[in-house]
Amino acid sequence: MSTEFVKQLNPHPATDEVREAVLQNPGFGKHFTDHMVCIDWQGDVEANTGRWDNARLQPYGPLSLDPSTAVLHYGQEIFEGLKAYRHADGSVWSFRPEANAARLNRSAQRLALPTLPEETFVDAIRELVTQDEKWVPSGEGESLYIRPFMIGTEPFLGVRPSKEALFSVIASPAGNYFGTVEPVDIWLSRTYARAGKGGTGSAKCGGNYAASLIAQMEGDAHGCSQVLFLDHERGDAVEELGGMNVFFVFDDGRLVTPELTGTILEGITRDSVIQLAKERGLQVEERAFTLDEWREGVNSGHLTEVFACGTAAVIAPVRRLVSHDETIGPEDAAPGEVTMSIRKQLLDIQTGKAEDTHGWLTRLA
């Protein structure tokens, strides 16, 4: 049964001229559509009771929160990220939204927030995109980035799960995340960790990203686009970037990516890449991959390509790994053949240029 939303339309939506100007150069996360979706929850997570209600489409705008609201003090917050793509016939589709819904619920359980029915998650996205369909770009590599999130909203100072929550969805037209598909440099963080054993590394919560920002600032200062974290307790095993998973391509047909240990986000793009790689005959290995192995692979020439992946950037080729002590990788590295081939295949499915044989696409408008 689909979710019923009460509609309050924005009395002052962006004009056609303003919207078209934004869509000419959307950037990433800079502009937002005219509406948002909100659903409230009340209950007791510890007792596994409660209900979602008051589902509504409303004008995009500020949230009003009491200064004692739980999320402001104890960080009970999770979010998702997915995209809507306009196909050649004008229809709008999303990529694996059910997987995002399932991951949101895993994050909710880790952060002691209520779970949301997966069909309600998809209904909320469809409601917003249907209303703000004119905001979906049609340019090459462009999409509507969709940001569902959930926060604890009970006004209460006490260390326990919030008895009130808000689930909301906002959307933003998006161009290429890095502005180019040229290889990017990655900063190696030797000082900071993104997550630890038993922590929230596998949850998509704001605290993980906040913890990565200081390392990202360090990378920015050295001209790097992202930061890579290591697990020092496992021989400097590669974890993930600040917001992306990482893959290594070898000349013998192997594709290696760090195994999911509970400290790495279970990326939906990561999972999709693994499926596509296996179908094209690559030997996919999900295992510990150390910094030493990275270095030795580059020096021997057997490691031929490195790329990162995530919803925002899809797939980004990696040129060099940079740190205070060393630089791994050639300065003149070009985007690799496997990297760009998988990137094209994935984008072609998402944008409707290739047949979706996996059932990954869901029509929104």
Image (cartoon, grey):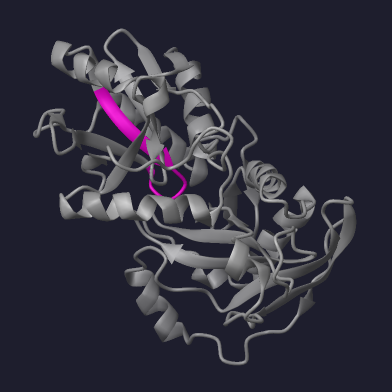
Q: Is residue 112 left or right of residue 270?
A: right
Where is residue 326, by image quadrant? top left
Looking at the image, which is closer to me, 78 or 35?
78
Residue 313 part of the magenta-drawn span: yes
Q: Is residue 38 above or below residue 323?
A: below
Image coords of residue 224 (percent x, y): 21, 47
Residue at figure coordinates x 75%, y 68% from the top left: 39
Image coords of residue 252 (percent x, y): 30, 7
Which corner quadrant holds the N terminus?
bottom right
Q: Main secondary structure of the magenta part?
A: strand
Residue, far top: 252
Residue at figure coordinates x 20%, y 14% from the top left: 296
Image coords of residue 24 (percent x, y): 33, 70
Q: Is residue 140 left or right of residue 39?
A: left
Q: Is residue 263 above or below residue 39?
A: above
Q: Is residue 179 visible?
A: no
Looking at the image, which is closer to me, 246 or 231?
231
Looking at the image, which is closer to me, 94 or 269?
269
Q: Is residue 174 visible?
A: yes
Which corner quadrant holds the C terminus?
bottom right
Q: Which residues are magenta?
A: 305-314
Q: Is residue 363 left or right of residue 269?
A: right
Residue at figure coordinates x 49%, y 38% from the top left: 269
Where is residue 247, by image quadrant? top left
